[in-house]
Amino acid sequence: MMLLTRKMIEIRSLLQTIGQSETLTLPSIVVVGSQSSGKSSVLEAIVGHEFLPKGSNMVTRRPIELTLVNTPKAQAEYGEFPALGLGKITDFSQIQRTLTDLNLAVPEKDCVSDDPIQLRIHSPNVPDLSLIDLPGYIQVEAFDQPTELKMKIQELCDKYIQPPNVILAISAADVDLANSTALRASRRVDPRGERTIGVVTKMDLVDPVRGAQILADRNYPLRLGYVGVVCKIPKDTKSLFSRGSANIINQLTKNESAYFNAHPDTFGDVTTGTPNLRKKLMHVLEATMSASLATTSEAIHHELAEATYEFKVQYNERSLSAESYLAESLDAFKHSFKGFSDIFGRKEVREIVKRELDQQVLNLLAQRYWNRPVDSLRPVDQVTDGSVQQDPISSLPKADPENPLWHLKLDASTSTLTKLGIGRLATTITAQALQESVEGLLHTSTFASHPFTVQAITTASEGILRDLSFDTSDELEICVKPYKYRVEVDSGEWARGRDNIGKVLGRELKDCEAANRAVEEQLGGRRKAKDVLSFIDRVRSGELVIEGSDGVGGAGGFSAALLAKGREALFLRDRADILRLRLAAIKSRQCSNPANKYYCPEIFLDAVADKLTSTADLFLDAELLSKFYYQFPRVLERQFRSLDEGTVERFAREDPKIRRHLDVVKRKELLEHVLKEMEGLRVLEAREKRSSSRG
Ligand code: GDP
């Protein structure tokens, strides 16, 4: 029973999943031969299908690690490339195409690559075998095959034909064995011919007697002997069956046995035929596997000791799986989110909403009140008499509270503010602040090094906030509706508004002055700025007339760019003047009284903004924040719990540190498992030996 080979092949597949190390190679049969020696034909005869790349040019550029898995009960025959994840391929011509593509993908300049292609073939018609097909040796250098290629192939083959591998040396009968490249290569590494099987192909091309003599060769004795085969796929087989799907074993065997049976006397004492070759391969591999059990176990022990040491020293024996890593990361993230939700509440919402409304108030004021030159904000009598104004406070506009124009202005501004769409505005900026905070938390969490989860979490919170915002903004709009008709401000609210808008204007003035300084810097300093500004002022006031110019397009010895900057500085200067004036006004006695609201629109509008904010923060806290804080962690939990194993694994492996940790854990666990299997095999092997020696 070829149990050992099968088990060892399974073990090899397991070891391959953790990347087989150099010391952990289980014995294989390595197939070598020169080009056209019939190497592919032999392999295809063993498998029973045409599946290897064909072509006049050298097509095998990478080793093919071919694992044959006998599946006695299954009907279906299929191949799979474990590293490619293409699934089961039942069409062997597709396997052939894939192999061709993989080989052709090796860059021309590299000639060959030692990165093996793994191919597994499952079939009831194949024995359990592990074979490695290598690029064919070049005997005659073609014009397009440089010497370097010859050397590279030789190096590659030499790497594989080392012990404990069995060498399957393919030579064609119509070429003198003395010239066989395969045998020459084998003799270099196996001089006593102990682990080489000689296969002589194309037996039909030489006289049967001569053929039999080759197989009984005494010049190049091999302990495992020679097998003669005829592996030419008959022409009619190719046309009879659709290529790629039908099994050609029967046709080949019929053809081959017809030849050998035609000369029973000649081939009586030598081994011939593909079926015999298969049997030999199975036995030899089984025996080799058996012989290498002890050394392989030792090698696995060694690897395990290394993995265990690394696990201990590097990871302090902290076990880790992709699932546990995900769960821990999610818990930590949820914890930090909880921390955030504890400190981001109504007060914080109030701050961001009010800040936004302060800006809206400033814009409104600029549009409706501060939109004319400074002088127009001053009392008319002082401007017309041309005197320099010393005290803006005492000269506030003597607006008649009965004058409908002043009423209209303030009513219109208030109306603009209350009908701003506060529901949408406040909800949007609060949702944005929440979203930015989530993203901020993400970037300081373990998820930061996982693009996949960053994306998933960002999308999840965006989705929840979008859904919540929809209703919240409509409902909030309804809540602020009364203010759209009438706003009453009491003296306490007025005092707060006065205080707040003073601060807002103060900040705005500072910003304006800073911007002005920056522009002056760009203009080449204060003096230069003054020159440019006074030039523009003179043109504006009509004192200077520049012909054929709009007065600012590169005139007065100043470049157009300089004048454009100058206009900017002028704007900032005017704005700063207005702000200073209004600040002084707000601080004035008149503005301490709500009855004077028409003199002090800034204070009144701030008080209105404050009322709107109070409604908004209360509502947003109850509707947006608390719902988001409740839903978000639960949605994440649900989403992450439903991820499939592959996705969780991919997630965890995105982080190189975690990938290494997971690899060590996996390697250690797998080696422990393999070692146990190996011990079992050794016990079984010893028992079989005992019983066969008794028998
Ligand atoms: P490789 O380059 O070593 O893989 O050689 P192939 O298997 O491609 O065979 C080279 C050529 O020899 C092909 O045309 C095959 O059809 C032919 N060939 C292979 N085996 C036999 C055989 O046993 N008898 C005959 N007559 N031709 C064969």
Image: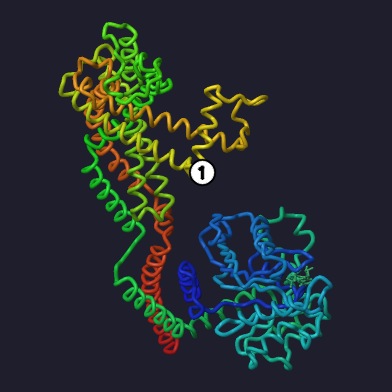
In depth, the one of 577 and 167 nearer the eye is 577
**Residue 677 visible somewhere in the drawing:** yes
Up-down: is 416 above or below 233? above
Q: Residue at x 18, y 23 (%)?
A: 493
Up-down: is 259 above or below 623? below
In depth, the one of 243 and 637 nearer the eye is 637
Q: Residue at x 55, y 22 (%)?
A: 542
Quadrant of the rendered structure where residue 678 is?
bottom left
Percent position (x, y) of residue 527?
49, 42
Relative horizontal placement of residue 588, taking residue 304 as reference (left or right): left
In depth, the one of 660 and 35 nearer the eye is 660
Relative horizontal placement of residue 281, taking residue 209 as reference (left or right): left
Q: Residues within 10 Å of mark 1 (few under 14, many from 20)?
A: some
Query: Would the CB of label 1 be found within 8 Å of ligand 1?
Result: no
Relative horizontal placement of residue 127, taking residue 349 as reference (left or right): right
Quadrant of the rendered structure where residue 593 is?
top left
Percent position (x, y) of residue 291?
49, 85
- Would you name the residue on which mark 1 appears? 522
Colour pattern of the rendering:
rainbow
Up-down: is 84 above or below 210? above
**Element marked by disc 1:** helix
The quadrant of the rendered image in which ligand 1 is seen is: bottom right
Q: Residue at x 33, y 27 (%)?
A: 581
Q: Quadrant of the C terminus?
A: bottom left
Percent position (x, y) of residue 651?
41, 54
User: In the image, what residue type sits under mark 1?
Assistant: Gln
Quadrant of the rendered structure where residue 284 is?
bottom right
Up-down: is 26 above or below 576? below
